[in-house]
Image (cartoon, rainbow, N blue to C red):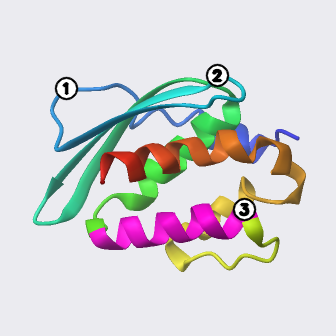
Amino acid sequence: MITNEIIKIASNTTNVGLTNKYTFKSVKKNSICGDLIKIELNSTNSKINSMKYETESCVYCEASASLLAKKIKTMPINIVRKELNRVKEGVKFNENFNFHKKFDEFKLLINKKNSKRINCILLPIEAVLKALK
């Protein structure tokens, strides 16, 4: 069920639009529904400075990308990798998953009500992890 909170997160376009100036880049497509995301990450001194993205996707994927871009800014790359892998693996296998404090807002998206859209919600996370390999 799409809530007003999810729509509000998805409508934040601060980080939308690729610049072709990046340290890491990735494209990821959801094979189930066809959602597509392209991301660019800029980093210096092993910290993420910014994430820019473009999507052809549903509101869940857009909200996840918007929230993720906000949350990983200024985080060390190794922590981003660790925590996003933890989220990706944890939510698939554990309904009572405890989020890292920095990613607590993802509870708005990753919950029992949205379980059928988990692949859409995780797509931006998977794209960032792919870029950081």
Residue at image x 22%, y 26%? 19
Numbered circles on residues, count: 3
SS for tag 1?
Answer: loop
SS for tag 2?
Answer: loop
First in residue order: circle 1 vs circle 2 = 1
Where is residue 10? Give x, y as percent. 61, 36
User: What is the quadrant of the N terminus in the image?
Assistant: top right
- Per the model, the C-alpha gap separating discs 1 and 3 is 33 Å
Q: Is residue 80 magenta?
A: yes
Q: Which residue is mark 2?
A: 34
First in residue order: circle 1 vs circle 3 = 1
Q: Amino acid at mark 3?
A: Lys
Q: Is residue 94 above or below residue 121?
A: below
Residue at image x 55%, y 78%? 101
- Marks 1 and 2 in Cβ contact (< 8 Å): no
Q: Which residue is mark 3?
A: 92
The magenta span reads: 78-92
Outermost residue toward the left in this view: 45
Give the mark toward the camera: 1 or 2: 2
First in residue order: circle 2 vs circle 3 = 2
